[in-house]
Image (cartoon, rainbow, N blue to C red):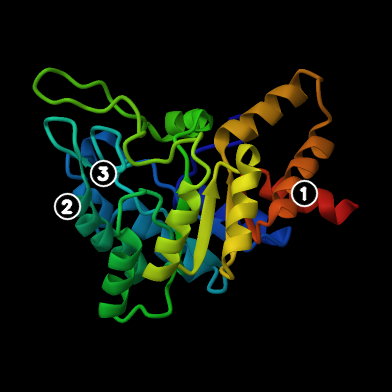
Amino acid sequence: MPGQSRLGWRTGMINKVREARATGVNQVVVFPKTPDHLKSATAEECFNPNGLAQRSISLLKDTFPDLEVYTDVALDPYNTMGHDGMVRSDGVIMNDETVYYLCKQAVSQARAGADVISPSDMMDGRVGAIREALDAEGFTNVAIMSYTAKYNSAYYGPFRDALASAPRPGNEEWRIPKDKAEYQMDPANFRECLREAALDEAEGADIMMVKPAGAYLDIIRALKDSTTLPISAYQVSGEYSMLKAAAAAGYLNEKDAVLESLISIKRAGADLTLTYFAVDAAKWLQEA
């Protein structure tokens, strides 16, 4: 991902956020790169109060009190098997056990100061369980942005490489699913997004996310037309990298192509867009 780096939490992250705020970008999402020695099959590091994500959230809020900090709730950055949920030895993703840990993770992030909890795991029932867990701990004002329509997409590769969070190979003793098709959505299935949206809204989601964005503009529009909740869209690492590669090769004008891609996401119905082009786009729009 040219132009993107993993940032040290004490200085690099703070400097990057300060740069973003100078352009008018005041919402950030924290994605931690967990050291391998802290990963485990059950991903307990995800709710460590002194974990990398929790320390980063606290430092961001201490440094920039009005910054809106979004988080990522899933086990794959902490899981030795590279899945968003716990994997049983026969290869089954353990939904309910995973949701229990996701709730602990969400509460630990809220306690660190997060404004918006963002479950990206795609386990069943996790939005309602997280809402209940947050409320029980007094975090009634912490919002939930659910990854409602997260597809089993080929566009996630660069991000998974950066976080070393892709599924690992299994063996005869422990089968590991080769991809995330068991719980992420089928790109060929349009109607599933409507069912997932209805469930997430009923369980207490405040914002609903579509991921990826560019190849799923119809899904963004479908959710926009089916709910009064805000819709967010994630222009993912593969989308970013394709545009950067085409611009580097001289095939596209980077500024024009990026802004057109963001306009199309907005036109489809997105109220918020998560993009690696955020700072560049903000600067370009100020120049216009």
In the image, taking residue 122 as reference, residue 105 lies left or right, namely: left
Residue nearest the observer in this picture, 21 or 228: 228
Among numbered discs 2 and 1, the one appearing first in the sequence: 2
In the image, taking residue 121 as reference, residue 22 lies left or right, namely: right
Residue nearest the observer in this picture, 6 or 190: 190
In the image, taking residue 86 as reference, residue 83 lies left or right, namely: right
Q: Which mark is residue 139?
A: none
Q: Residue 257's spot in the image, x, y percent? A: 79, 36
Q: Which mark is residue 263?
A: 1
Q: What residue sits right under mark 2 in the picture? A: 97
Q: Give the residue drawn at x 31%, y 59%.
A: 126
Q: In the rendered image, which quarter is residue 141 located in?
A: bottom left
Residue type at mark 1 is Ile
Q: Which mark is residue 85?
A: 3
Q: Residue 277's spot in the image, x, y percent? A: 68, 44
Residue nearest the observer in this picture, 280 or 183: 183
Q: Quadrant of the N terminus?
A: top right
Q: Give the residue drawn at x 52%, y 64%.
A: 207
Does the CB distance between marks 2 and 1 fall below 8 Å?
Answer: no
Q: In the rendered image, which quarter is residue 198 located in?
A: bottom left
Cα–Cα span, label 1 and label 3:
34 Å
Among numbered discs 1 and 3, the one appearing first in the sequence: 3
Element at badge 1? helix
Q: Is residue 113 visible?
A: no
Q: Give the residue drawn at x 48%, y 28%.
A: 157
